[in-house]
């Protein structure tokens, strides 16, 4: 009877595997692949997360196979297939994907050889490494066949539907290399550029799910065309088109529709024309970038609501200094300081104690008392620097507890 590959594994393979630190080994393999195969892509957090998940799954699978806990055909390849789909959607050549696997295998076997060295005279380093190699390579070849088929299928779908052509054209529109409108642009995009635009940045999701979401939004708000492309591993770039620049009725309808989404979304615009197509997208990206800075960001972020914060929070340290200098002792994190700040912000925004009381759900006298407290701290600034105070209050609210800064020293 012919011995199987597992039969030829050294008897201490289980012991060797037990000495492997899977998270640390996965990081080593990920770093090797990132440095030599995807150096220009791993700076993107979403791409790096997808690569790390794929590598970790493959490392665990290899260890399971090498220790006879599983056969190559028993391994679930979904993680590898998902990463192959992402690479294809981003237009990264297949050769890089295949090379990543061989770099990963090489790094994994190098580490296995190092750990096998203390095995003793009865099990030389070359013997366990040879056995592991024979066990692992059928798995690697099976995965390569599967990811090649997935990559080819995704690429074929993109080519047949014009997705790759649209993605390339959108890239040229966004970088400004296409500036003049022609009818051919509409034809190639399947989207009307001459009207008004709202741009959306949607979180990760399957292509069919994202397109269904945008289609529902378009139908709900009366959009006459819509466009979805993948510009980044972390998000989808989408546009809703209108015959003219969307008015308040359209915007209200979009807000209502977006309020029902469970996924994070950022909105830019409205704007019009080829330039407006680009500017609306830039605004949506700026709003999306604020999500990690704002203390309690809503699911839907509108750039038009956050223009001031986007501009001033470009330098968070300068923003903190500005807050501390303007608000003084009211910068603190105490509940009392927070109540006074909230009341003062609403009062300055509405311009009325009565309207502020109604919005806050408190008695008008409570508003007056808190504003008087603010006056005791701020002095003449409450009347002489109302604009600066309003800005500082908005920034303090946006930054939340982590953005609290120590008030300026008095002396």
Image: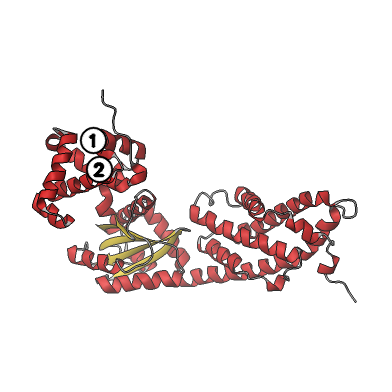
Above or below — where is 159 with respect to 305?
A: below
- Residue placed at 31% from the left, 43% from the top? 333
The reply, left or right, for residue 117 in relation to residue 171 is right
Query: Residue 303: horizontal and vertical position, in percent?
Result: 29, 54
Nearest the viewer among 80 and 177 is 80
Q: CA distance from mark 2 to mark 1?
A: 14 Å
The reply, left or right, for residue 265 in relation to residue 255 is right
Extreme residue toward the bottom, this view: 1
The reply, left or right, for residue 60 in relation to residue 110 is left
Which sits earlier in the primary sequence, circle 2 or circle 1? 1
- Residue placed at 29% from the left, 27% from the top? 409
Residue on which disc 1 sits: 326
Classify the position of the N terminus by image quarter. bottom right
Q: Name the element at disc 1.
A: helix
Classify the position of the C terminus by image quarter. top left
Query: Residue 320: horizontal and vertical position, in percent?
Result: 32, 38
Q: Name the element at disc 2.
A: helix
Residue on which disc 2 sits: 337
């Amino acid at each position: 009877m012919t011995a199987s590959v597992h039969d030829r594994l050294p008897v201490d393979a289980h012991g060797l595997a037990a000495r492997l630190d899977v998270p640390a080994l996965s990081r080593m393999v990920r770093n090797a692949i990132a440095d030599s195969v995807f150096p220009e892509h791993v700076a993107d957090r979403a791409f790096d997360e997808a690569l790390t998940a794929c590598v970790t799954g493959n490392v665990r699978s290899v260890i399971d196979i090498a220790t006879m806990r599983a056969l190559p055909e028993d391994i679930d390849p979904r993680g590898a297939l998902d990463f192959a789909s992402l690479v294809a959607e981003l237009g990264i050549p297949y050769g890089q994907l295949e090379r990543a696997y061989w770099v990963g295998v090489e790094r994994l076997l190098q580490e296995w050889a190092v750990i096998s060295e203390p095995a003793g005279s009865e099990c030389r380093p070359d013997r366990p490494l040879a056995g592991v190699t024979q066990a692992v390579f059928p798995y690697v070849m099976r995965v390569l066949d599967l990811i090649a088929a997935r990559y080819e299928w995704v690429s074929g779908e993109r080519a047949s539907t014009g997705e790759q052509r649209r993605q390339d054209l959108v890239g040229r529109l966004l970088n400004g290399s296409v500036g003049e409108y022609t009818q051919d642009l509409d034809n190639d995009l399947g989207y009307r550029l001459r009207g008004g635009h709202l741009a959306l940045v949607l979180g990760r999701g399957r292509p069919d799910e994202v397109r269904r979401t945008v289609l529902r939004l378009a139908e709900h708000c009366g959009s006459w065309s819509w466009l979805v492309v993948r510009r980044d591993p972390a998000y989808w770039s989408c546009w809703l088109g209108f015959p003219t620049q969307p008015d308040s009725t359209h915007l209200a309808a979009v807000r209502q529709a977006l309020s029902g989404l469970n996924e994070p979304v950022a909105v830019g615009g409205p704007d019009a024309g080829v330039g407006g197509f680009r500017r609306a997208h830039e605004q949506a990206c700026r709003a999306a970038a604020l999500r990690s800075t704002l203390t309690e960001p809503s699911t839907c972020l509108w750039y038009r609501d956050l223009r001031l914060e986007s501009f001033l929070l470009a330098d968070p340290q300068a923003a903190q200094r500005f807050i501390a200098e303007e608000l003084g002792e009211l910068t603190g994190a105490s509940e009392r300081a927070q109540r006074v700040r909230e009341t003062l912000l609403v009062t300055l925004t509405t311009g009325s104690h009565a309207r502020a009381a109604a919005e806050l759900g408190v008695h008008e006298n409570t508003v007056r008392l808190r504003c008087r407290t603010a006056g005791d701290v701020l002095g003449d600034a409450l009347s002489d620097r109302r604009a600066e105070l309003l800005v500082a209050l908005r920034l303090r609210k946006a930054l939340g507890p982590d953005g609290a800064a120590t008030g300026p020293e008095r002396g």
